[in-house]
Image (cartoon, grey):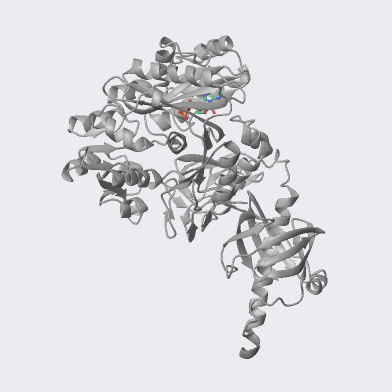
Amino acid sequence: MFTKILIANRGEIAVRIIGTCKRMGVGTVAVYSEPDFRSLHVVQADEAVLLGGARPAESYLNQTKILQIARDSGCQAIHPGYGFLSENAAFADAAAKAGLAFVGPPGPVIAMLGDKIAAKQLAAAAGVPTVPGHIKALVSYEDAAEVAAEVGYPILLKPAAGGGGKGMRTVYRPEDLASALKMCQQETRKAFGDDAIFIERYIEAPRHIEIQVMADSHGHVIYLGERECSIQRRYQKIIEESPSMALDEPTRAKMGQMACALAQRSGYINAGTVEFIFDKDGQFYFLEMNTRLQVEHPVTEMVTGLDLVELQLRVADGEPLPLKQEHIELNGWAIEARVCAEDTDRGFVPSVGLITRYAEPRGSRIRVDSGVDAGSTVHVFYDPMLAKVITWGKDREQARLKMVRALNGYHIEGIKTNVDFANQVITHPAFISGQLSTNFIAEHLTEQTKRVAPPEKNIHFMAIAATLIHHLRDNLIQNSLLPMRARVGRTSAPRIPPAYIAKSDGFIFAIAIERQIRENEWRVQVNDVRYEVITPPMEYYRRRLKLVINDQPHHFRLRYSGNFIETAFCGNIQTFEIYTPKEWQLAQFMPKPVPKATDNLLRCPMPGLIVEIKTQPGVRVFKGQELLTIESMKMETSVASPVDGEVAEIGVAPGDAVDTGTVLLSFK
Ligand code: ADP
């Protein structure tokens, strides 16, 4: 086995690879960019070498420098992780030329499979069903119009070099084809430096299911079950699971064998993933093959009991696969939730800044792969994914419940994250019953489509958590005001008033602390429903609270500010205002706050870099018109005019770094 490898990546995946290397006794060299100097992967690797500036081109994509560092530090192999150089054929070739093992398939295989058109042709030749369409690059608009008519609308325009959902455009009507094609070409050229585009039938609300394969350099290929990754936003996965509810044993075997056939035919070596989409009738079609370790590989590890990074290293070192297909057993169920720095209320725009508090969920069969900790900074230059939570259960429901609990206890402050949004997904009745599709979020969880109110029980639990904490804190403060002698033995003695009024989201709850049975045991009533509650000893200053309610443990996240307590539970975040009956009466007479006046400034909605300014002073603009483009975390976002008006002055220039709230321009 290698004695030392270089990890050409950052964040959670670099940390995860280091973990396996440590276990196997393989030394690790981390590389990092300037702003990453305090990152977890830098701290945890045996050695760490600075690459350069913040921008990927200056650091994690700097092939020459990475190869130089690998050689100088005596590494025998390079693990590219995912993203960055992981699917770069030239880099794989260059590594091989430099005498380093690339932990992934050979360069020419990456090149062929990286071209979606070539990959589709190969799949078709291997007898794998492909999405109906035209397996050729378009040559002109006329060509596109003809092909689209043949394939039948709606169609999807797809960049051959694609990745991360970039450039893809759905077209529903022939009259929209010309402009969509132009946009797709522009985006494709910018993102991939090549504008080969092809057409596929757009499958409405499909499921995304993929097969993990592993191939060695001795001609053996095996598959390790499937992963369902239908829950996506912006064509990017956020919740994944293995196995998939949509597959029966024969279909699983059929897809697995097809994936292996495709791998074999392409001369594949190492870990790879063959992606399929399923239409409503259960027909499946090949999408593409990803020639690297996937973000969601841990769910496969949980159900197979294998360490995919270990297998990758062994295969890269020339060892034959240690198991045959008949040795692979899928056990139980695993679910993964990606934790991303983003504002889920505002179209999933990235959120950056300093992580001021950080606490991960812990427990048996809960795995957290994280690249951050308290004190980490999240930059605009990199992917917004911070960590992944993976849970395992005997069946899907057990794994799901474990995930709900884990996410309830995941505490991150300083930046916005999707933790509660992920919990909304997995607590949604449609998710519970397994009605998944890539349309899930649009269908169930946008501002317009969100219809499912949280169960009343959950709201009661939140009201109890907020009220009990308020009660305990208030008691503590009152007790500390008593003379020393009176305080002895009194810390837990309940003081009146035992009744509170909690207001949240327009609802009012009457909460009676009926009885304190023991020091930490309570009987509480919420609007006439009675609950038995156990509070942990002395934990009422914590941001995470575990309560046992009617014999079941539940985790809450709390933030207090006076009698306002923000409570997060099962994807819901609600602020409870807690009053004693007397305070409540007084509160009714308090003046209402006056809404703030608007000004004539356009402020930046998110942190990032200005890419383009599409207007000028003196120009009349319309509400909804795109005025600027901002790049943040590998994504470009347009900023639209909030008004009909005339631009007065522009305060920024392309290349400027901006933050949320920076004034971009003013209107007359
Ligand atoms: P990328 O390489 O950019 O990630 P993929 O080909 O893997 O692109 O597709 C990403 C996602 O886009 C899929 O999981 C699916 O949600 C959607 N998608 C791709 N092709 C189609 C299609 N023909 N019809 C409907 N949805 C599709």
Query: Who's the residue at 17% across and 43% down the image?
Result: 74
Classify 72 as above or below 484.
above
Is residue 310 or residue 621 the one in the foreground? 310
> Which quarter of the figure is the N terminus placed in?
top left
Q: Is residue 526 left or right of residue 295?
A: right
> Picture coordinates of residue 278 (x, y %)?
56, 22
Is residue 664 or residue 530 the one in the foreground? 530
> Picture coordinates of residue 55 (x, y %)?
35, 45
> Picture coordinates of residue 177 (x, y %)?
57, 20
Is residue 170 or residue 246 the one in the foreground? 246
Quadrant of res 84: top left
Q: Is residue 73 left or right of residue 414?
A: left
Is residue 1 or residue 265 the one in the foreground? 1
> Picture coordinates of residue 43 (x, y %)?
32, 55
Q: Is residue 367 left or right of residue 34?
A: right
Classify 537 as above or below 460.
below
Residue 571 visible in the snapshot? yes
Q: Is residue 649 left or right of residue 513?
A: left
